[in-house]
Amino acid sequence: MSFVKQLRNWFQGRRRDLPWRVTDARGLRDPYRTWVAEIMLQQTRVEAVVPYFENFMQRFPAVEDLAGASEEEVLKAWAGLGYYRRARFLHAAAQKVVEDCAGQFPSDAIGLRELPGVGAYTSAAVASLAFGERVPVVDGNVKRVVSRWAALELASDAPALHRAAEEQGALWMLELPAGDLTAAGELNEAMMELGATVCLPRNTICDACPVADSCQAKALGRVAELPLAKRAKKWVDLEMVFLVHRVGKRVLLEQQAGGWSPGLFEPPSQIIQQGTSQEAALEQLSSSSNPESHGIVRHTITHHRIRAHVFATKALAQSKHPNLRCPDDVPLTGLARKVLTRVLG
Ligand code: SF4
């Protein structure tokens, strides 16, 4: 049996019911739900995405609802999923679909790539699942499967591996039965599922693999070596001070204009620059002589490792300060949530 048949048979027997896998009479998915799910799934595990997806669909059941919402509402519905740029792109893309395309999603990968935040991966996923287009998806899972199955001597982040996975995927698409609208989406999902659940980076479960009999890395005993390791990430370590001003249930929260999460809210903070002290950074945040220390929280974002020294004070001069807000009412950064939990419990 061919690779494609083995993989599709295997996937058909284990496909899970997920809220974005609802299909119409032709077996195709709704493009709006598929697109939102794919964006959420980019950096987040399936189990973690399900409740966020269901909540998001309740708040914004159609692309018109998302387009008509404020950015703050969208960020709030996204809060907890991280990588907030995705939510901003989602919002901007919904507005483009409504304004430029009368609420209809482009029906092929090339057209979908015109939408903000939609790259090669998402456009291929939506085009194949919602419109039946025969275009392969390539993500980290797919690249790992291809690199092992064909025993390619390439690093996991090498552009050459990406190209090889696209080319191999396009060849497999040619083997799908003519006229079957669901085949391309199914093959793409099967590849991703194999990479996510069987052809794992470590503890690979080759004994449960449907394509083990044609896998080159398995035959050569090189599964653990492939794909080759990528260059180590260069971390930047940052020391910060956060000051939580409380007035009753409200906290002073500032909306971030730039940085890692523009548009989201955090308590006032300062980076402790080299050659300066924590006390000096704290002084810039507060005129209060005796803020209370709440220890240190750690957080990583992109290539930054942050150690945040948390302080709190109730001595805010103006209890009517415009930035005093209830933390539940605004979208917070991941770091802000950790800082506030440390102070407020
Ligand atoms: S046999 Fe092992 S290494 Fe090869 S594709 Fe299957 S799970 Fe991956």
Image: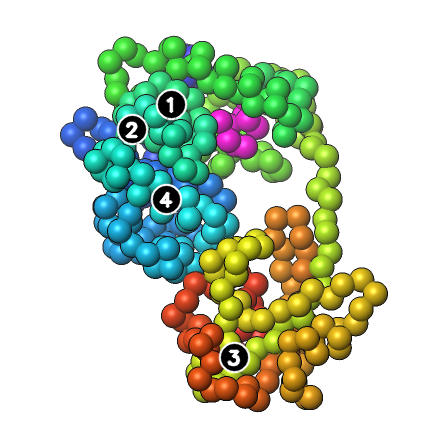
**Disc 1 on helix, strand or loop?**
helix
Mark 3 or mark 1: whose residue is earlier in sequence? 1
Instruction: Name above or below for residue 115 compared with residue 269.
Output: above
Question: Mark 2: few, some, or many residues within 10 Å (few <14, many ≥20)?
Answer: some
Gap in angstroms between the C-alphas marked 3 and 2? 46 Å
Instruction: Find out whether the residues at labels 3 and 2 contact each other: C-beta distance under 8 Å.
Output: no
Instruction: Find out whether the residues at labels 4 and 1 contact each other: C-beta distance under 8 Å.
Output: no
Q: Amino acid at mark 4?
A: Ala
Tell me the tag on residue 344: 3
Tell me the tag on residue 110: 1
Mark 3 or mark 4: whose residue is earlier in sequence? 4
Start and end of the magenta stretch? 138-147
Q: Which residue is mark 4?
A: 92
Q: Amino acid at mark 3?
A: Leu
**Disc 2 on helix, strand or loop?**
loop
Residue at (19, 33) in percent of width and height = 24
Q: Nearer the viewer, mark 3 or mark 1?
A: 1
Q: Where is residue 185 shown, x and y percent of the image?
A: 34, 26
Q: Answer yes or no: is residue 50 visible.
A: yes
Residue at (38, 10) in percent of width and height = 174
Q: Which residue is mark 2?
A: 106
Q: Nearer the viewer, mark 4 or mark 1?
A: 4
